[in-house]
Amino acid sequence: MTEPRIYPFGDSALVCEAPPPATLACQERIWALAQAAGEWAHVVEAVPGMNNLTLVFDPLRADMEALARQLAHAWNRAVAVKAAAREIEIPVRYGGEHGPDLHEVAQHAGLSVEEVVRRHSSAEYVVFFVGFQPGFAYLGGLDDSLHTPRRAVPRLEVPAGSVGIGGAQTGVYPAASPGGWQLIGRTASTLFDPARNPPTLLQSGDRVRFSVVEVAP
Amino acid sequence: MIDVLRAGVLSSVQDSGRAGLRHLGVAQAGVLDTLALEVGNRLVANAPQAAAIEITVGPAAFRFTRATRIAITGAQFAATLDGVPVYTWWSLPVRAGQELVLQGPTRGMRGYLCIRGGIDVLPVLGSRSTDLAARFGGLGGRKLRDGDRLALGVPAAGARSASAVDAPAFGVKAPQWCRFAEVAHEPVRRGKHVAGAERAAVIRVLRGPEYDAFDEAARAAFWSDEWCVTPQSNRMGYRLAGSPLTGTHSGDMLSHAVLPGTIQVPSNGQPIVLMSDAQTTGGYPRVGVVIAADLWKLAQVRLGGAVRFVRSTREEARYALAEQQAYLRQIDAAIAMHEERMQRAAGRAHAA
């Protein structure tokens, strides 16, 4: 695999960025690197992004150059983690009040509503990373035909549990928040609960399937 | 116990924040001015990271149900205890039933009320900090309201006589009056900030990963402008206004982690400096990163105030942090000396 770009990010972080395009194989390597680097001395945390990893360290104690070398070395040795591959099912009520944009997505795709639901719920998704807000998982694996641009005007409040499509991504909003994704359904699953350990339903590397509870007209 | 008589615009329970959970999307939260928290806790003989009340602008008022010791650090509040003016950056004895009133600050944006024993709310995910966006931690995951009542922790064992509840008040030198907080800089071209605002805060910045993706005019403006801190700024980020930083050719960026201090530039060209409550990942070009040692200064810039960015180096960033640590050690030494004097005086009184 080609060399990653490793660069400083402020005085307390380093970024290891893999050459594009972002692939699952590359992301698996990033998870492996995150797992390893999280254990290093003076490293506060290792945060996977899309095709990249940010290493946050204690700026008074860590030696940034040494850490950068260590990162480059570990990247070359990293064996892609085929993750413990937890499989998580997320039951979804598609359409109706739960998925107000389902028709729009169908129209954009030139498919029937039923076919959109079938394709969305038959794919297996992989959590590339979790970010943005607690428990928000960036899922890879959305069927090409379902890629839909974000809404021109974001909604001021998207209900918690909303399942949406934004460009080539699909995902679930863990908490009510503003959002620009097309909403196709909603789940009753709790994506984030600070009292639980771990607090998020989904973690990097998890496999996710959406199951159909109902499809409202 | 402490009664919140008046919570003001935004007061919340905060400690030094959550670490190690960004990979689950959990923000850091925690105080914005970490130096003020560390000093305040030292003044009341708490662990340096104990939870305090962060008071944004005020005015706020509190009543203490039992005798304790407090310190108000951070912003320079006009504070009174039962109507009698008290200093900020002092360790103050408080009697049961006394009321503390904090009027608007004459300088700074956020004050910290540190109380002996610390604010005792249930730690969630390793911290007592309130995550206002995700609504957990602190008191019910929300900002404080009038009429709230907060429990206080049990003071650390081996209480020192200087911090006994009836020991006299004493103070330390606030960081903004210290040499290390000063930054030498060139004079600036006319700023765009509100007339009459405080002088622009000088914030040291390292170039961000996408710095070179901005055109020359944008890069020049970044360093030469006085940036106005707009009223849309909050604990998640400082939204700045000035010359639009456009002309980037960074294209579509893949999501990456962002940290407090990250200066990102959305498509409107107006930079946002991320603060403690910021989301964990983002996708905007990162024009710069505030050095860790200057985050507390930024936290004290008021809405409508101005900031200037000056170029820094990693060596300087590290040195600045080391100086801050040295300042904290001086505070420790000063408190220890004060303690020794108190004990000697007590010994003499006993002998007599």
Image: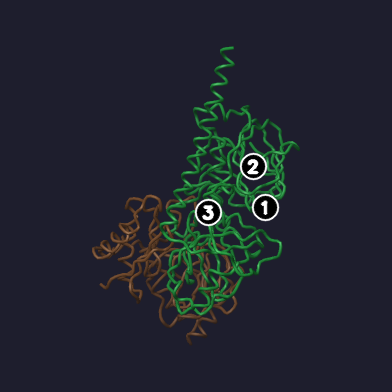
Chain colours: A brown, B green
In 3D space, how far apart are the residues under numbered discs 1 and 2 (Cα atoms)?
Answer: 14 Å
Nearer to us of marks 2 and 3 is 2
Q: Nearer the viewer, residue B12 or B91?
A: B91
Whether A128 is drawn above or below B214: the answer is above
User: What residue lies at 43% left-to-right and 58% top-to-bottom?
Assistant: A11
- Say which label, 2 or 3, has the lower sequence index: 3
Which one is in front, B145 or B179? B179
- Residue B173 in picture, x, y percent from top left: 58, 42
- The chain letter under disc 3 is B
Q: Are the residues flagged by discs 2 and 3 from a single subunit?
A: yes
Precedes in sequence: disc 3 or disc 1: 3
Disc 3 crowd, CA 10 A, few/some/many (<14, 14-19, 20+): many
Q: Which residue is mark 1?
A: B57
Mark 1 / mark 2, whichever is N-terminal: 1
Which residue position holds label 3? Answer: B29
Mark 1 secondary-structure assignment: loop
Q: Secondary structure at mark 3?
A: loop
Badge 3 amino acid: Ala
Residue B155 or residue A89, whichever sits in front: B155
Residue that carries the numbered disc 2 in the rendered image? B88
Q: Residue furthest bottom?
A: A110
Mark 3 or 1, which is nearer the eye? 1
Above or below A86: residue B249: below
Question: Can you tell which of label 1 and label 2 is closer to the viewer?
Answer: 2
**For mark 1, does the 10 Å Cα neighbourhood hold few (<14), some (14 to 19), or many (20 or more) residues?**
many
Instruction: Give the position of the C terminus of chain B as an image quadrant.
Output: top right
